Image (cartoon, rainbow, N blue to C red):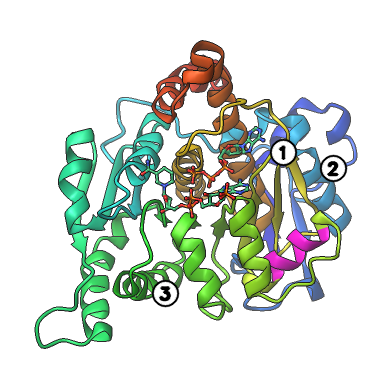
Amino acid sequence: MIWRFGFCYNTLLRNGKDASKSIKAVLWQVGKRHSQNSVYSYPLRTIAYRRTPMQVATLDQEEQFVKAIPLKWPEFVKDILPTLNPEKHKGQCGRVAVIGGSFEYTGAPYFSAISSLRAGVDMAHVFCEDSAAIPIKTYSPELIVHPILTTFPKLDKTVEETAEYIASRVTEWLSSLHCVVIGPGLGRNTLILETVAHIIEEVTKRRIPLVIDADGLYLVSVKTEMLRNVTSPVILTPNRVEFNRLTRAFEIDDTSDAESLLKTLAKSVCPGAIIVQKGLNDLIAAAFSNVVVHCGEQGSLRRCGGQGDVLSGLMAAFSAWMQLNSNLTTPSEWFIPVYSACAMTRRCSLQAFKKKQRSMLTTDIIEEIWKEFNAVFPLSSL
Ligand SMILES: NC(=O)C1=CN([C@@H]2O[C@H](COP(=O)(O)OP(=O)(O)OC[C@H]3O[C@@H](n4cnc5c(N)ncnc54)[C@H](OP(=O)(O)O)[C@@H]3O)[C@@H](O)[C@H]2O)[C@@H](O)CC1
Ligand SMILES: Nc1ncnc2c1ncn2[C@@H]1O[C@H](COP(=O)(O)OP(=O)(O)OP(=O)(O)O)[C@@H](O)[C@H]1O
């Protein structure tokens, strides 16, 4: 099987500097490494790829490409960001959904969804517990809020029947979505988690990129089989506590070094897994790669709650653009949107922290998104 190995090689080649010298390929022969059902696999096709001719890349070259991402960022991102032009209509720059929000936690899904919108997606839905909907709507008229999740089974229905029914009301929206975030403020109610398990099944069946955070990660740790065969992109963003819970759940020997642990976890979750271990540096590993990418962009010194929600929202935006870009075809390219979300979250946090210092809140970070995006990706450069 041959995979198109894409667009950012072209960026590398165009710029032709240091890290790019050894990377000459735009295609690579996967051969034994990936099976028919391999991650993000695409049918064999011969292409005259964009600006550069077709070549065959080795696995070593693919690794070098991934390692070059922090060096070449944000140059790599240009091919992912949607252009803005007068012919586009609403939705063409991305439609995302956050599944989360409960009686206790209404801020988290708001932070996530509004961050996606501020980054530049056109529409953001929130599917939340009924009691959370009004508060979320009052935070922002921009969000489309669906009070669909419920903590009690419907009359005459079992938990399982109710979960299936409610999941079907959410999944009828999936055909219009480019990325789904699961978890911010979701809570741990049994019926809601059961409902979300059904939704995840449908999202992955349709190969829509999935971002899993917070209580969504809790669900993964109690249902370790849930994603086992998923080959579409599943991006997990655990903090320290969530990461430890996952390694315990997947019975991974935590005596190995941090990078090995992360890679083993990614391979254990599913073939499509990409894990961001958040912390002083964000570490990114994927089930389909041997490289661990470090994002060490300077962030803030404040650790107020909600910063992980901004990350999940930006992750959804970059993932939606990746999904929308039909020229993107190789799994390793997914390191680019993931790295971009990590870097941009930290950069926005730093800008907010410079202004508000000890008083910095998550809403201050969200306030910085437009400025930081304009600074890093000016419209004139696209
Ligand atoms: N405004 C809102 O609506 C927000 C809602 N949110 C939502 O809350 C829900 C629950 O989230 P959660 O599981 O993260 O529980 P949370 O109580 O935060 O932590 C549990 C304990 O773990 C520890 N700990 C945490 N991080 C750590 C670290 N990096 N490194 C080390 N330890 C760490 C710490 O324990 P400690 O040991 O410090 O006592 C902490 O008390 C979830 O749905 C989420 O989306 C959030 O998004 C925030 C904004
Ligand atoms: N020590 C640190 N220095 C700089 N940035 C950090 C540090 N720890 C975490 N971050 C950044 O803060 C963001 C949120 O990470 P954090 O670990 O706080 O997630 P979380 O606990 O899931 O957040 P939330 O409060 O939304 O649940 C990420 O972008 C991460 O890179």
Figure check: 9 above or below 202: above
- Front position among marks 2 and 1: 1
Residue 213 screen position, x and y as percent: 49, 55
Q: Residue placed farthest to the top in the image?
A: 355
Specify the amino acid type for callout 1.
Asn
Over which residues does the magenta segment extend?
Answer: 260-267
What residue lies at 21% left-to-right and 87% top-to-bottom?
158
- Residue 218 as seen in the image, left or right of residue 36: left
Residue 256 screen position, x and y as percent: 86, 64
Residue topped by disc 2: 23
| Gap between marks 3 and 1 measured at Cα | 31 Å
**Quadrant containing ligand 2:** top right
Residue topped by disc 3: 201
Residue 332 screen position, x and y as percent: 69, 53
What residue lies at 57% left-to-right and 57% top-to-bottom?
236
Does the Cβ of the disc 2 residue fall within 8 Å of ligand 2? no
Specify the amino acid type for callout 2.
Ile
Q: Which mark is residue 50?
A: none
Q: For this rendering, which residue is in front, 270 or 38?
A: 270
Number of residue marks: 3
Residue topped by disc 1: 281
Does the Cβ of the disc 1 residue fall within 8 Å of ligand 2? yes
Q: For this rendering, which residue is in front, 111 or 40?
A: 111
- Residue 165 as seen in the image, left or right of residue 250: left
Name the image quarter holding residue 17.
top right
Which is more N-terminal, label 1 or label 2? 2
Name the image quarter holding residue 377.
top right
| Gap between marks 2 and 1 measured at Cα | 26 Å
Q: Residue placed farthest to the left in the image?
A: 155
